[in-house]
Amino acid sequence: MRPGVAAGMAASLIAAFCLAAGPAAAAGALAVGLCDRHGYSSDAASIAAASDLALKSCTELGDRTCQVVVTTQQTCLALAGDGNDNCGARGWAFAPTDERAKVLALLECRNHGGSDCVIKVAVCDTSG
């Protein structure tokens, strides 16, 4: 067998294996702490990786109370907070679209007593 044919066959086998395995699902996460402290991630390789990144991002702000409150896979997430009170109401949500996630996060913020809720974070997974 000629070297070029062997290399072409090997490349075809590798491509077929990758396609059969399917695409990796992009993952995201949101972590929140005290007041307006938060961290988030998107397009991570796994839910565990997304959670770790979001938690690290939040705790790097000096808040050891941070907790992951939502994880996503191939979708959007949003966080809203009361614009008049950094330690006031917050709401978060995930949805198939950026706009829907924002609407739901604002609604949750208002439902928790926010009077001037604004979007603090909105991100969508783009790979996968």
Image (spheres, grey):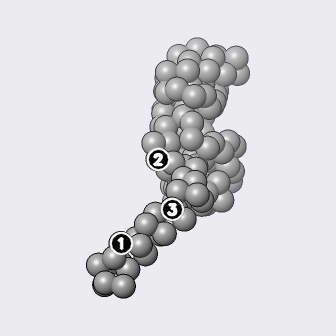
Residue for badge 2: 127
Q: Position of residue 107 (x, y in %)?
A: 63, 17
Please report whichever mark, 2 or 3, sits nearer to the chain's N-terminal start. Answer: 3
**Nearest the camera: 116 or 51?**
51
**Relative side of 61 to 67, left or right:** left
Q: Amino acid at mark 2?
A: Ser
Q: Secondary structure at mark 2?
A: loop
Residue found 66% across the figure and 59% down from its top: 48
The quadrant holding residue 72 is top right
Q: Is residue 4 above or below residue 122?
A: below
**Relative side of 66 to 6, left or right:** right
Q: Amino acid at mark 1?
A: Gly
Q: Is residue 101 above or below residue 43?
A: above
Please report whichever mark, 1 or 2, sits nearer to the chain's N-terminal start. Answer: 1
Q: Position of residue 62 (x, y in %)?
A: 55, 58
Residue for badge 3: 16
Mark 1 or 3, closer to the camera: 1
Mark 1 or 2, closer to the camera: 1
Residue 118 numbered tag: none
Q: Amino acid at mark 3?
A: Ala
Using the numbered discs, state the Cα–Cα distance from disc 2 to disc 3 in whole angstroms: 20 Å
Residue found 52% across the figure and 56% down from its top: 19
Residue found 43% across the figure and 75% down from its top: 10
Using the numbered discs, state the Cα–Cα distance from disc 1 to disc 3 in whole angstroms: 12 Å
**Nearest the camera: 110 or 34?**
110
Dot 1: few (<14), some (14–19), or many (≥20) neighbours within 10 Å? few
Circles 1, 3 touching at the beta carbon (< 8 Å): no
Residue for badge 1: 8
Task: Name the image quarter holding the N terminus.
Answer: bottom left
Using the numbered discs, state the Cα–Cα distance from disc 1 to disc 2 in whole angstroms: 28 Å
Q: Is residue 22 above or below residue 92?
A: below
The quadrant holding residue 47 is bottom right
